[in-house]
Amino acid sequence: FIRLSSSRMSVQKKAADGETTGVEHKIRITLTTSKSVANLEKVCADLIKGARDEKGLKVRGPIRMPTKVLRLTVRKSPCGEGTNTWDRWEMRVHKRVIDLYSPPETVKQITSIAIEPDVDVEVVLQAK
């Protein structure tokens, strides 16, 4: 899924002669997965390639956030009797953050790449 949100503030970019050339926003793209890190890295690379090479935007990232490890330890026996044996389950949540600096109209074009099915994408428009 892709979640879009925005802030109310915007910044106008000034040219060397003092004219305003347009509104420039900081676009923060957060990518999250718990299944495949390779797919997450592939989506990051595609986003950055599309923004830098095709659009010529200023890009920061991908910033690798610390991996969250969610652990669950449960008894194997459903009735509670017998030998105390335990199952240990864990889920790792991987997260990447990419910052783009561009007009808000280009967000749709940048995020129109093919996104892997197990990667969640969140796009936030912020003032620079």
Image (cartoon, grey):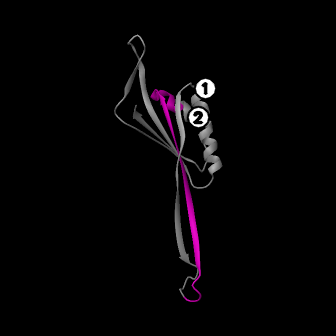
Name which of mark 1 and mark 2 comes first in the sequence.
Answer: 2
Check disc 1 and give the amino acid type. Answer: Glu
Q: Is residue 114 above or below residue 36?
A: above
Classify residue 2 as left or right of residue 43.
left
Q: Residue at x 40, y 35 (%)?
A: 126
Q: Which residue is mark 1?
A: 54
Q: Secondary structure at mark 2?
A: helix
Circle 2 residues within 10 Å: few <14, some 14–19, many ≥20: many
Residue 106: give its label: none
Q: Amino acid at mark 2?
A: Ile
Predominant secondary structure in magenta?
Answer: strand
Q: Is residue 37 above or below residue 71?
A: above
Q: Residue furthest bottom?
A: 82
Residue 101 falls inside the magenta stretch: yes
Tell me if I can see residue 14 in this picture. Answer: yes
Q: CA distance from mark 1 to mark 2?
A: 10 Å
Q: Which residues are magenta?
A: 81-108
Residue 81 in the image: above or below residue 50:
below
Q: Residues within 10 Å of mark 1 (few under 14, many from 20)?
A: few
- Residue denoted by label 2: 48
The residue lying at 54 percent from left, 38 percent from top is 61
In the rendered image, residue 3, in percent from the top left (x then y), is placed at 47, 43
Inspect the magenta stretch and tell me whether residue 36 lies in it.
no
Q: Tell me the residue at 59%/81% (across/down).
A: 85
Percent x, y for residue 62? 55, 40
Q: Regarding mark 1 in the picture, which secondary structure is present there?
A: helix
